[in-house]
Amino acid sequence: MSINEASYAFGAAKSSIREIAAYGAARKAEIGAGNVFDFSLGNPSIPAPAAVRASIERNAALPPTVLHSYTPAAGLPEARAAVSSSLNRRFNTSYEPGDVYLTCGAAASISITLHALVNPGDEVIVIAPYFPEYRVWIETAGATCVEVMADPETFQVDVAAVAAATTAKTKAVMIDSPNNPVGAVYSAENLSALADALRERSDAFGHEIYLISDEPYREIAYGCEVPWVPAIYERTIVCYSYSKSLSLPGERIGWVLVPNTNPDHDELVFAIAGAGRKLGFVCAPALFQRVLIDCVDEPTNIEAYAANREALTSGLSRLGYHYIEPQGAFYLWVKSLEPDAEAFFQRARDLELLPVPSNSFGCEGWVRLGYCVSRETIDGSMPAWERLAALYE
Ligand code: PLP
């Protein structure tokens, strides 16, 4: 075959999360939306804040040649300044607009960061279970994806295991806290231990190991602190998006931050810009850059997710399901009732329940339930979860 084999393979294999979501949409068309309980996709059912609509309407009145123009590749200076000032207010930092590179969401932030960092043959460590697209983006950047299991009890980073997995080729470790899929929030102690280990390993190998902190769920935490990672490890790059915090996943808007405290800041800023150029992103969507100027500090509707979390966890625990109590994000990691999560998923699907089996996240024996769904989906699904549990009695 003369076309690109890796691209063909990624396209042919498809994302199992999106496959299940597509099945759910087709099934809803067949038997009615109220009869299918789709927990597959991290697509917020909470509407974007009213301020977003107001900002879109205000900006829509701009002259079309302004509104629809290209922006600078890194973003409009005012939008970058809105982001850096917001971070400075929240984390007591002194970032500059030039530290912020606006992107088409976290997917672009992570791809750009990986392309900025890795050379062919490098290794990037991910903490399993992990968001499946990480492997696609890491391999596309020419690196090898090295999976290290999280601590099986707490789902915090297993620092000793990460240190043991580092090699002379390790270029970066990727973390995601609040975590998709398990809902863990990494503590300051855990991250400090990781930082110490990465410094020690960098010294031992004589080259830098970077920490890529993917944070699309930063604002969604249930009463616990989400530590600011660049304050703990100096060679951190932060990847962010408004897909979840402002419920804007289809609009594709986010950023990469190269903190001015990163010792390699100047080179990294150029490499991020070069990677964005290389990958053909051109600029982030112009309208939503303008929306950020107005809405960067809009609060996330955490109460709605907290209520969903409560409804789902209390319902499932009454039915005897075992799950990891989520500290953040909007996913519940539920133990499969048989060792084969794929077989458990098939039985769930027969009852119109659509979780995602854990195999796609790099681990066996669990399923992920996204509770960014409507409250009716959660409440309406309980009889089916009860029937599913009864199959295993
Ligand atoms: N990282 C994690 C952990 C995610 O869960 C997602 C989306 O679900 C992304 C990155 C990609 O987010 P975006 O829609 O902003 O590209």
Image (spheres, rainbow, N blue to C red):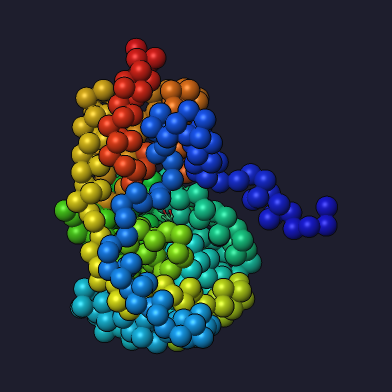
Q: Residue at x 67, y 46 (%)?
A: 12
Q: Is residue 110 visible?
A: no
Q: Residue at x 44, y 27 (%)?
A: 352
Q: Is residue 189 left or right of residue 20?
A: left
Q: Quadrant of residue 335?
A: top left
Q: Is residue 309 above or below residue 82?
A: above
Q: Quadrant of residue 234?
A: bottom left
Residue 259 point in image, percent of width and height: 35, 79
Image label count: 0
Q: Quadrant of residue 378?
A: top left
Q: Residue at x 40, y 50 (%)?
A: 43
Ligand 1, seen in the image, is in the quarter at bottom left
Residue 356 point in image, percent of width and height: 45, 37
Using the image as rendered, state which of residue 247 and residue 205 is in the foreground. 247
Q: Is residue 17 visible?
A: yes
Residue 327 point in image, percent of width and height: 24, 48
Using the image as rendered, state which of residue 209 and residue 356 is in the foreground. 356
Q: Is residue 226 left or right of residue 208?
A: left
Q: Is residue 114 left or right of residue 41?
A: right
Q: Residue at x 34, y 77 (%)?
A: 58
Q: Is residue 34 above or below residue 145?
A: above
* Quadrant housing the C terminus: top left
Residue 339 point in image, percent of width and height: 44, 25
Q: Is residue 18 above or below residue 216?
A: above
Using the image as rendered, state which of residue 389 and residue 94 is in the foreground. 389
Outermost residue toward the right in this view: 1
Outermost residue toward the left in this view: 223
